[in-house]
Image (cartoon, coloured by chain):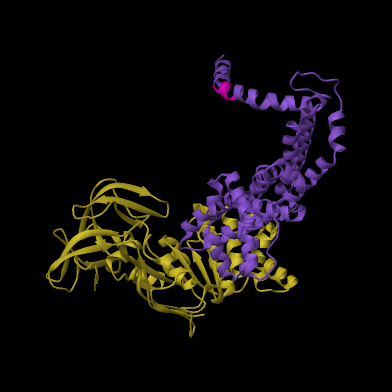
Chain colours: A purple, B yellow
Amino acid sequence: MVESKNNLKAWLYLAPALILMAIFIFYPLFNTILIAFKEKYNYMTGEFTQFGFGNFAFIFRNQIFWRTVSNTFFIVFVSVPISIMLSLLIAVGLNSIKPLQKVFQTIFFLPYVTNTIAIGMVFAVMFNQSYGLINTIIGWLGLDNAINWVGYGAGWGRAMTVLLIYSVWEALPFKILIFLSGLQGIDKQYYQAAQIDSTPRVRVFTRITVPLLSPMIAYVAVTSFIGAFKEYTSVVALFGLDTSIRDKGIGTIVWFLYRSLSDPRVGEGSAGWAAAAALFLFVIILIFTFINLYISKKRVHY
Amino acid sequence: MEITLKKLTKIFSEKDAEVRAVDNLDITIPSGKLIGLLGPSGCGKSTTLYMIAGLLQPTEGEIFFGDEDVTKTPPEKRGIGLVFQNYALYPHMTVKQNILFPLENMKMPKDEALKKAQYYADLVGIGNLMGRKPKQLSGGQQQRVAIARALVKEPRVLLLDEPLSNLDARLRLQTREEIRRIQKETGITTIFVTHDQEEAMSISDNIVVMKLGLMQQTGQPQHVYDDPDNLFVAKFLGTPPINLFNGSIKDNQLYIGDEAILPFKAKDQDVTIGIRPEGFDVKKDGKLSIEVASIEHLGRDISIIAKHPNFDGHTLRGIVDADTEVPNSGVIKVNIRPNKCFVFNKETEERMK
């Protein structure tokens, strides 16, 4: 009796969150899966010809889609490991300096509180062909400084270089913050014990700091892998318009998804292609997260 | 390895205050002995230990290992083994990896290192737990792992910071015997810090009693107990604690209240008299009258809880032989054993002899 009453109360308390989640998360999620299998789905009229794998067949035959998939994987497997290693080193460095620690912490955290689009545009300006800071510096070094980084005709290689630099840099602050708080939670006595046993610095880092920080590293790895798979804003911020992105072939899966949604071929079921791409991405993220968690289980020491 | 501390001083400066954690400490620790640094919390004993370890830099003074001045030597070059209060075992490594860790730093060949690790693990009695993680061990076992890790690199000096404070009462008793045995077997100069006087007295060759950064007295435990230099040392050593009385000296006689208990050559003055619990002899014609409050039979002996108007403390307790006849209440007469009775100056709290 008491229990069922409490149950009712519990559901009541949960209701606002559950209702909101149902409307904005569960229903869209479910619907996306459904749409992905509706062939020639017209989201204006709600008509579709049949359930099937037509949308998947379409995107899997699409050159641009595979380009975005390979771009996404490239970003994930280059930028995430680099940014994790860099932020770990910066965090360890920050943790070991006493003066100006707060100042540096603030500087490193600034990108996090700044708008992505704004920073992206700053990057775009920095890498501008004719008046960008980077080319100016290259000019000082006496090298050919007319490199087209982000403009039309820049090519995939240069554009990807800028995109990777940007995404690594953008990902640092949050990771540094997590690692720093993790480092500060490590008992100083481990380091004293290591010092007394004359442990070389590199070994202290690899045998003590990294293992003791491994829960944080696992958390950061999982979240940033997921984040990198969904990379989109940075592409738009750096390269701007659709035509510019297509010109360099630098789009990501999420970019493909948005592009399909705004495709004028509504009647042919462009929304279905987007849904199929979304589902594809979802499955990939799911698989990688499981792999991540599986590895962490073996390698993380709580 | 003989260790000499010369005028060792450590000052911690806080915002506007200076704390002299250790003040002009002069100690010589003989080679191969087990030394207990003893004192209440905040007396500077751990600070002293950490200065010997090199983890803290002394403000003034010098530290010698043998003839070698190690004051400026970093901890990793001092050749010490340190057991931390909470052991500081690396939680992600097994017992074996923990013990091997110092040897790997020394780049010792693998099989030699393994042999050594096993030897010391067996010595401290955890040889069968090599595959476990620290979390899967009891407090006492972790403690032993920490000692094995400290010993395995065969340091010149072994330092133990409150080694028994994290253990329960029974384990503590067992482990302190263990520490003694290990120290004897290895013959390594060992310094350990404790606030537990019983612990220090039971296993140390020598104890150093400290208070507020100052050394109070040093010597063999029994000697310090039998011949305390001042009131603090007398109070700090011994369980049950020493009984203190407000007394006086008149005509070369020691008085508690109106009763002269012992002859004592000194000029007339008020003094503090300390009598060890075992310093009472129940006699019909005894010189001091005390009122019995209750009696506790402890098997081997009897504990008399008593009252006296001049008693200055919590519980006046005397311990006498089990075959002594003591009434449950009423006033009894006792004699005081001269060697269990100490007289202290009221002002300076120094011992008067």
Where does residue A242 sit, x and y in percent of width and height? 72, 41
The answer to whether residue B237 is left or right of residue A203 is left
Q: Give the residue at the far bottom of this rendering.
A: B67
Which quadrant of the rendered structure holds the C terminus of chain B? bottom left
In this view of the protein, which residue sits in the foreground, B194 or B176?
Answer: B194
**Location of residue A255 with respect to B180 vertically, above or below:** above
Can I make out residue B194 in this image? yes
User: Which residue is rendered at x = 68% and y = 26% of the image?
Assistant: A26
User: Which residue is rendered at x = 61% and y = 74% of the image?
Assistant: B154
What span is colored magenta in the figure?
Answer: A13-17
Q: Give the residue at the far front of this rendering.
A: A130
Locate residue A90: give its quadrant.
bottom right
Where does residue A235 sit, x and y in percent of width and height? 68, 45
> Total label count?
0
**Location of residue B288 with respect to A201 vertically, above or below:** above
Query: Does the magenta-highlighted stretch encompass residue A153?
Result: no
The answer to whether residue B157 is left or right of residue B198 is right
Where does residue A67 sit, x and y in percent of width and height? 81, 45
Where does residue B60 sit, x and y in percent of width and height? 37, 76
The answer to whether residue B222 is left or right of residue B86 is left
User: Which residue is rendered at x = 57% and y = 46% of the image?
Assistant: A118
Can I make out residue B90 in this image? no
User: Which residue is rendered at x = 51% and y = 52% of the image?
Assistant: B168
